[in-house]
Image (cartoon, grey):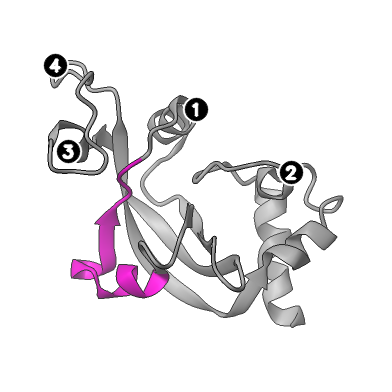
């Protein structure tokens, strides 16, 4: 899960009640479907900071609640308001995410790109990728977290 630290950082997650928050604002059908169909309670998450001086994986989190309607889609005061979304058939979903741990160091985007072959088509290192949520295979997870100790 990728976020801009100026909007919502790992520190913000740590400061959230019970170190948990809903991952709101997803307005991409592919991501919505991944959240709905593929995320389960207990799934681990790489928490990634983007659009900052040193983009990279900064921590781990876990899913604590499966997909449910994003309340911001119905709030006209919200940046994420969607006037076309019907409360009887919500268009957008959220999952709840809880802090697990901060990495000992940031695993940078440059490091991930340098190991693109080893990461077997990891979506994050694809040119032009702007998805805020993306799947990670078990092999990719292991390879990425192995980098934490190599810095």
For label 3, count other residues whose C-alpha is less than 10 Å away and answer few (under 14), some (14-19) or many (20+).
some
Quadrant of the frame with the C terminus: bottom right
Residue drawn at (54%, 68%), measured in percent from left and top?
52
- Using the rendered image of the protein, determine whether residue 66 is visible from the camera's viewpoint: no
Q: Earlier in the sequence, mark 4 or mark 2?
A: 4
**Residue closest to the far right:** 117
Task: Say whether disc 3 or disc 1 marks the residue closer to the N-terminus.
Answer: 1
Magenta range:
10-25
Rounded to the nearest angstrom, the CA distance separating label 3 from label 1 is 19 Å
In this rendering, position of residue 50 left or right of residue 92: right
> Could you say whether the residue bearing mark 1 is in a helix, strand or loop?
helix
Left or right: 59, with 122 as reference point: left
**Vertical position of residue 76 compared to residue 116: above or below:** above
Which residue is more in the foreground, 90 or 44? 90
Disc 4/disc 2 C-alpha distance (Å): 38 Å
Tell me whether the residue at label 1 lies in contact with that at label 4, contact meaning CB atoms closer than 8 angstroms.
no
In the rendered structure, are the residues bearing label 4 and label 2 in contact, judged by CB atoms less than 8 Å apart? no
> Residue 38: percent from the left, percent from the top?
47, 34
| Mark closest to the chain's N terminus, 1 or 4 | 1
Q: Position of residue 150 (x, y in %)?
A: 76, 80
Q: Position of residue 93 (x, y in %)?
A: 30, 33
Secondary structure of the residue carrying numbered label 3: helix
In the displayed structure, 35 sits above or below 65; it is above
Magenta-colored stretch includes residue 129: no
98 or 4: nearer the viewer: 4
Give the mark nearest the N terminus, 2 or 1: 1
Residue with the mark numbered 3: 71
Q: CA distance from mark 4 to mark 3?
A: 13 Å
Q: Which mark is residue 127?
A: 2
**Residue position marked by numbered label 4 in the rendering:** 88
Look at 14% across and 16% down and name the residue there: 88
* Residue 92 visible, this angle: yes
């Amino acid at each position: 899960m990728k976020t801009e630290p100026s909007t919502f950082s790992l520190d913000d997650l740590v400061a959230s009640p019970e170190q948990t928050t809903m991952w709101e604002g997803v307005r991409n059908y592919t991501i919505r479907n991944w959240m709905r169909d593929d995320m389960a309670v207990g799934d681990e998450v790489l928490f990634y900071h983007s659009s900052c001086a040193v983009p990279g994986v900064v921590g781990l989190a876990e899913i604590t609640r499966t997909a449910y309607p994003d309340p911001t889609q119905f709030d006209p005061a919200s940046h994420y308001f969607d006037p076309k979304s019907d409360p009887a058939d919500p268009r957008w979903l959220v999952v709840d995410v809880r802090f697990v741990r901060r990495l000992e160091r940031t695993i940078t985007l440059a490091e991930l790109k340098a190991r693109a072959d080893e990461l077997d088509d990891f979506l994050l290192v694809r040119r032009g990728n702007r998805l805020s949520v993306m799947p990670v295979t078990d092999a990719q997870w292991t390879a990425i977290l192995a980098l934490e100790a190599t810095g």
